[in-house]
Image (tube, rainbow, N blue to C red):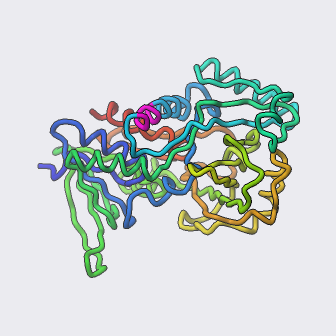
Amino acid sequence: MADFSHLVVGAGIVGLSVASRLAARTGTAVLVVERHSAFGTETSARNSEVIHAGLYYPPESLKTKLCIRGKNMMYDMADRIPGISYRRCGKWIIAQSEQEQAYLENMHAKARQLGVPAEFVPLSRAKDIEPAVTARSAILSSPSTGIVSSHSLMECLLGQFENDDGILALNTTVSDIEYDMNRQLYSVEFEADDENSEKTKTVLKFEKVINAAGHGAPGVSNMLLPAERHVQGFYGKGSYFSYGLSQPKTQRLIYPCPSGHAGLGTHLTLDLGGRVRFGPNVKWVLSPDDLTADGADLDEVYEEIKKYLPGVEKSALAPDYAGIRPKITGPDHRGFTDFIIREEEGFPGFVNLLGIESPGLTSSLAIGEMVENMIE
């Protein structure tokens, strides 16, 4: 009696990864709904586009396991499919004090435990390799880190999904969800824009629902789960800054040693054309739509950058774009917060994906695999 076997809410990189795997299974009929007029316009399109190695998080966490698995899956997929643009450029993590060096030593030990390539670069050789970079205490090299065009990856996943008869509905939001325990079906109400830009409502039935709505995921979850199981979303804004000069230049990504719980520090990243950009910083905001790059933070960003890149010219820095981390813990939280990926108790076939921030892009293919195994 279902209209579709599966509903995936959200057409970002994670939603498309899940949907492409489900649509490839025999006997499935998969609908993806996206509230925007195009796929992948939120966090998936507003990040550093880094393929992370899997070094930063507790060894047994989902973030570590899915990052490492996703990294390997992503490189394998990109090697096989010419349309995915990527580069294994590597990364240096820079320590400027004994305390930061101790952090990197612990990271190195964890990398060996996990089987992730990482090695210290002798400071005596560092200037010959990256003359523009300054490190006072230590440099840990991560050769399996890379960069990828998230848009080309999403285009590939969408192509696979549609080739397997999956349907993507844009400009469509979920406005209500109910579960019929007797029929074991989810009735989902949608609100969509018609050709006259007027709102229309439709109700369809599904056997299973995957909530991959990013910033909207807490709201979708709260429509279905009882009040005592509601979750709240928080928004960690990160602004990126373009660099208007060709020098100083590096051959790889440069990250400072992490100093806070909300992000990995204001780092130097490269795009696939070799252009330098810096970011993101961290600023808590009230709305996921607050996407204006914040030039008011330029002085602070410059001070952070020049610690590891003293030749950077402040006048060449300019606000470029901003992204929002879809967090489920706020600015007062201290400590590690893992991904939440679970089939909700009492609601068989309803899978919540909450707090899928970094390394969500790197983990996306592994998350799709995990969800498929979880419900199929």
Q: Position of residue 362 (x, y in %)?
A: 51, 40
Q: Position of residue 89 (x, y in %)?
A: 61, 38
- Figure quadrant of the C terminus: top left
Residue 97 lies in the magenta stretch = no
Find residue 173 and report its image quarter. Answer: bottom left
User: How many numbered circles does the render carry?
Assistant: 0
Residue that appears at 72% across and 50% down: 266
Query: Can residue 180 be spotted in the picture?
Result: no
Front residue of this view, candidates 15 and 352:
15
What segment carries the magenta color? 73-79
Q: Position of residue 170 (x, y in %)?
A: 32, 63
Q: Is residue 198 left or right of residue 221?
A: left
Q: Is residue 50 left or right of residue 19?
A: right
Residue that appears at 72% across and 68% down: 295
Find residue 372 and report its image quarter. Answer: top left
Residue 243 to residue 58: above or below: below
Front residue of this view, candidates 276 and 238:
276
Q: Is residue 135 left or right of residue 48?
A: right
Residue 57 to residue 117: above or below: below
Q: Position of residue 10 (x, y in %)?
A: 38, 54
Residue that appears at 54% across and 40% down: 87
Front residue of this view, candidates 82 and 225:
82
Dominant SS of magenta comes to helix
Query: Can residue 41 be spotted in the picture?
Result: yes
Residue 215 to residue 83: above or below: below
Residue 76 lies in the magenta stretch = yes
Residue 323 to residue 164: above or below: below
